[in-house]
Image (cartoon, helix red, strand yellow):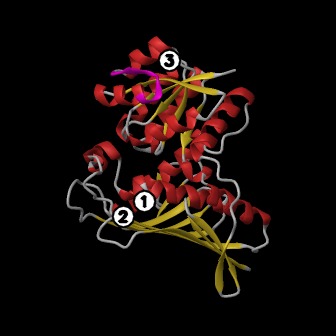
């Protein structure tokens, strides 16, 4: 069976999805919608699909099996709920929504409509990360003791759309957008959801009202400690995750390379499977739709990441540690 797919939002990430769909046999792109009609038309012409200005009209006309939502964060909930009620399966770009409460509304709509939804946490599909997860599970490096994730980049570049830097539309700054990737890796590699958060963030950006850096201490439900260090100011770019075990270390440069310790030095680990992460996402969703195979990034998993982001901001605002309960609600320990 070939599934018909539409894209909601014609920004840069839409191209990655359309390129992946070009290479797949079980899926077929049929249309794209964007409020900027010219942008939608340009993509439609390039990929031989239909263009729409309104995603609702597109879905009513095309009757797709799957809708890919690539809209700004503040539109995720509205679009996901509408698509679910229209009977579409959904691939939703991360973060799932602005906050955990909005995630709950999406989950309720998806369950009521009996459709399927995958959140696009691409870290799960990058070849270096998948190989690292394999090595962790093998256990040859011993017990995992800690994870340190560092991500520095020029977050305030001129090409970044303004909505990314507006709290009401983005949900937050670097720790919402890039921190979600860090939290995803920490939860996945550590094998358990985040349980405790202590954070300090800064607001020195040249535009917008979101944070531009943050230092976060975390513990997962098994007591594994981790840190996130991120800055979007004048930095030397860096993107690496270091994992410390009782018998060695791993260093993951997501999207680039994987390294393992030998004595007191690192050596590169060959990573053979270089399948496009966007293809793997689609395959994960379609397998789930067709066979019920569990998703790598379920709604509940993705909600837990948003809840951890909520806890980061709450911890900074209150200058104290916050916990994330097993039901995904961020609370102060005193409660």
Secondary element under disc 3, as helix, strand or loop, is loop
Viewer-nearest residue: 156 or 257 = 257
Secondary element under disc 2, as helix, strand or loop, is helix
Quarter placement of the N terminus: top right
**Whole-percent x, y for residue 291 in the image:** 75, 29
| Figure check: 149 above or below 301 | below
Q: Look at the numbered discs 2 and 1 and tell me whether their residues touch, using CB distance below 8 Å.
A: yes
- Magenta region includes residue 206: no
Viewer-nearest residue: 125 or 27 = 27
| Figure check: 332 above or below 289 | below
**Whole-percent x, y for residue 275 in the image:** 64, 48
Q: Which mark is residue 256?
A: none
* Residue identifier under label 2: 316
Disc 3 and disc 1: Cα gap in Å?
34 Å
Q: Which mark is residue 86?
A: 3
Secondary element under disc 1, as helix, strand or loop, is helix
The boundaries of the magenta stretch are: 46-53
Upstream in the sequence, badge 3 or badge 2? 3
| Numbered disc total | 3
- Identify the residue at image location x=65%, y=22%: 2
In the picture, measured across the screen, residue 69 lies left or right of residue 282, that is left
* Residue identifier under label 1: 312
- Identify the residue at image location x=73%, y=73%: 143
Can residue 193 be seen from the camera position used here? yes
**Whole-percent x, y for residue 283 in the image:** 66, 37
- Identify the residue at image location x=55%, y=59%: 255
């Amino acid at each position: 069976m070939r599934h018909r797919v539409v894209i909601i939002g014609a920004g840069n990430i839409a191209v990655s999805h359309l390129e992946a769909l070009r290479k797949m046999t079980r899926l077929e792109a049929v249309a794209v919608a964007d409020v900027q009609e010219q942008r939608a038309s340009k993509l439609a012409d390039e990929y031989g699909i239909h263009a729409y200005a309104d995603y609702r009209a597109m879905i009513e006309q095309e009757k797709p099996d799957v809708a890919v939502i690539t809209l700004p964060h503040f539109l995720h909930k509205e679009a996901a709920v509408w698509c679910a009620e229209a009977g579409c399966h959904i691939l939703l770009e991360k973060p799932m929504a602005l906050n955990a409460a909005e995630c709950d509304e999406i989950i309720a709509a998806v369950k009521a409509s009996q459709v399927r939804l995958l959140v696009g946490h691409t870290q799960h599909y990058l070849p270096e990360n998948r190989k690292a997860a394999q090595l962790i599970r093998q256990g040859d490096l011993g017990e995992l003791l800690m994870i340190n994730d560092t991500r520095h980049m020029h977050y305030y570049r001129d090409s970044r759309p303004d909505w990314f830097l507006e709290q009401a539309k983005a949900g937050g700054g670097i720790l919402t957008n890039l921190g979600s990737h860090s939290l995803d890796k920490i939860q996945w590699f550590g094998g358990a959801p985040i349980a405790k958060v202590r954070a300090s963030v800064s607001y020195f950006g040249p535009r917008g009202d979101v944070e531009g850096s943050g230092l976060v201490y975390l513990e997962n439900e098994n007591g594994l400690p981790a840190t996130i260090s991120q800055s979007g100011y004048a930095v030397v770019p860096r993107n690496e995750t270091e994992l410390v075990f009782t018998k060695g270390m791993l260093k993951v440069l997501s999207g680039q390379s994987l390294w393992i310790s030998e004595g007191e030095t690192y050596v590169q680990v060959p990573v053979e499977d270089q399948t496009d992460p966007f293809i793997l996402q689609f395959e994960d969703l379609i397998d789930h739709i067709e066979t019920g195979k569990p998703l790598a990034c379920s709604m509940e998993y993705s909600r837990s990441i948003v809840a951890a982001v909520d806890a980061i901001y709450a911890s900074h605002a209150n200058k104290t540690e916050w916990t994330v309960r097993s039901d995904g609600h961020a609370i102060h320990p005193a409660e």
